[in-house]
Amino acid sequence: MASNYEKEPIYVLERTWDDSTKLPEKYKFQGSGANKSMKAEVCIDSGTLGMEFFLDRTLPQFNQAGSRLDWSWPEAFLEFENVLGDSYRTTWQEVLAEHFPEPLGEEATSHRERIVAMLSEYREKLNRYERQSNLSDSVNCRQFLAQLVNLDVQAQLKVQQMQAAVDLAASRVKAARLDVEKMKKLVERETKRIASDAAKTAQRRMDEMATLRHSYKHA
């Protein structure tokens, strides 16, 4: 049976803002390190303009900010709450406190596993709310699931990027080791050649000296 999450969204009725609408305040991000001069702005979403605003404005802007400022996956995860307001932010902080009690590390794989677990948990909650005809909680749950799905996609990409980087590093290490072995063989070969040439030169001089001595004796 397909998940209820695959159903058409029940809350998308009409766009709740237009060009004349006063948009929410923007959060200003500042780059660091090599990207210190870079800046990005993202509309803070508190849900007042509906889920469509998050999907149309806040989320794309946040993704663009992450790309522009070259955030790692943990950095993007930590920055996410800055673009959420009011109940959205409170809910996100509660989720972090429940599922991520310790500081985030650099291991993206473990974070993705937690997000997958959260997706499963909230899909079960959505099923329960819809069976109970609890429209309000169903809508909130769908909205949060949409955010989790986006985070899961980002986590998958980061894991793939990390694995690709590891594979590339491993191939380079392997190539470097082969180069070292080649250099060792070349050095050994050159050392033997030099030693052989030196021995031949020494033998030739000894032969020349012996010839000279013989010549002097019979002069």
Image (cartoon, rainbow, N blue to C red):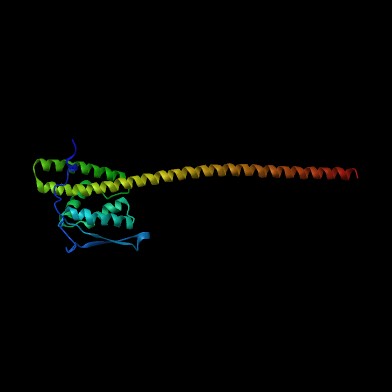
Where residue 65 sits, quadrant-wise, is bottom left
Q: Position of residue 78 (x, y in %)?
A: 26, 53
The C terminus sits in image quarter: top right
Taking the image as shown, residue 200 lies to the left or right of residue 98, namely right
Residue at image x 14%, y 41%? 127
Residue 143 in view, yes or no? yes
Which of 38/98 is in front? Answer: 38
Q: Position of residue 70 (x, y in %)?
A: 34, 55
Where residue 19 sits, quadrant-wise, is bottom left
Residue at image x 24%, y 45%? 115
Residue at image x 29%, y 48%? 154
Q: Position of residue 36 (x, y in %)?
A: 35, 62
Taking the image as shown, residue 146 lies to the left or right of residue 201, namely left
* Residue at the extreme top: 1
Q: Position of residue 39 (x, y in %)?
A: 31, 62
The N terminus sits in image quarter: top left
